[in-house]
Amino acid sequence: MASSPLLSYLEHTGRTHAEQSSKMKLAERIARIIEDRIVIEAWPVGFALGREAELAAAADVSRWSFREAIVLLEQIGMVESRRGRNGGLFVASTLFDAVRNGLSNYLEFLGPTPSEIRAARKALESVMIKQSAERMDDSTRARLKTLARAIGDDFSPEMISATAEIRRSLLDLAGNAALSLFVHSIGQALIHASWYSALDDETFKGLMGAMARSTRKTAEALIEGDLEQALVWDDQFLEHFEDVFCHSAMMSGLSSREGALERADQLFPAGRPPKKAEQIARKLRQQILEAGWPIGMHLGSEAELMERFDVGRAVIREAIRSLERLGVVEMGRGGASGLRVVRPDPVQMTLASTRYLRRAGLTAEEAACVRNALDALPSVSAGGTHQHLGSNPLAGTFIKILSEL
């Protein structure tokens, strides 16, 4: 592997920058340096950062400290280590994607009910729609009109793409990094709920079509300047949104319908796994979800997984790494060998989220706007009595992140 820009950077400045702060461990400082360079240089997914031994030497730190730094970055899914002749350290995702994926996975682990998911997203989307209405201009209206025309009455994959673009446009118009991160993390969970859906094809497509048409009507109301009607149509979208979660293996007691993964891939091309390893990772994730996410559950040894999925060691290890980056599993060593289900680390998830939001330039006013919406969430128990907000795990997690800024 040729000398990488990161290697050159570390040779000149790595150790100096790593020693600048005494508040963080050496491994955390090295991880922050690497994260900074990936973001500042906008290195794409798959970009070769160099070999760990060479990078550690360039940074003038021990292999142990450097490996610990890499583990921190792997935990948020930002880098991945590959073995073999063409191995080394590579960029695994953008900072936004890494943080969104980690946050979405953590939210799923918390096991919210469909109604809690809907309530949290409604609080966030009320901010999105109100701010979009305030900032709507002729250019945005023209774009929304074009996208709305792509959503007809008959179901098609194209209407799902147009729906995603409309909602992304409204988030961009709102211009609030926390709002965007939190809504996208819940949206990612919707894709996962669709992967493991228990619904038959007709019902599933009917729900997706209804969500698309509600989004079209929301956009049309905003184009006309009718904020109240836009909120009404968005609430209808969220009603269908909740139904998808109600009929998914992500909720306990359900089993995925055969072919649900492939069906969802037709609707959400961005979530389609391009490699065999990612397909295996999704099937392992399905096993964990359908079992109710039991911490410590044994999924098999490396050899057993190779035999079960009829693939080689390299493919299995890549599948395991992708799940380890999400904090879903851990491959034991020695007497504790084998793949086991683990608990995602809330501290690392919060740190990654707050670092991203600071870097994205979230202002105190913007953070307060989102927090106020979440604070206003009604929280009612099954018996009808009001509880502390913490009873909604999504809202509680988002507020925790905002409070750490």
Image (cartoon, rainbow, N blue to C red):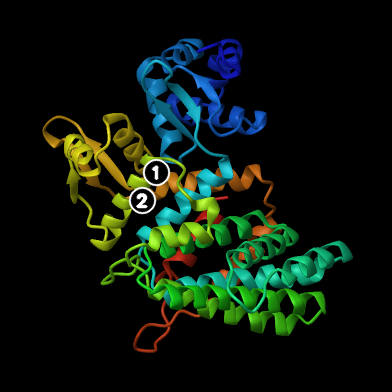
Q: Position of residue 205 (x, y in %)?
A: 49, 73
In the picture as drawn, the residue positioned furthest to the bottom comes out as 384
Rendering coords of residue 239 (x, y %):
52, 80
Instruction: Write the residue at 39% across / 75% down.
Output: 246
Choose between 196 and 153: the one closer to the eye: 153
**Does residue 335 lie above or below 158 as drawn?**
above
Q: Nearer the viewer, residue 271 or 177?
A: 271
Nearest the viewer among 273 and 81 is 273
Give the SS element for disc 1: helix
Pointer 1 residue: 278
**Cα–Cα span, label 1 and label 2:** 6 Å
Please tell me how many numbered marks the rendered image carries. 2
Residue at coordinates 84% horizontally, 66% vertically from top-left? 142
Is residue 2 in sight in this rendering? yes
Q: Out of 265 and 134, give the one closest to the viewer.
A: 265
Residue type (three-letter) at the residue carrying disc 1: Glu
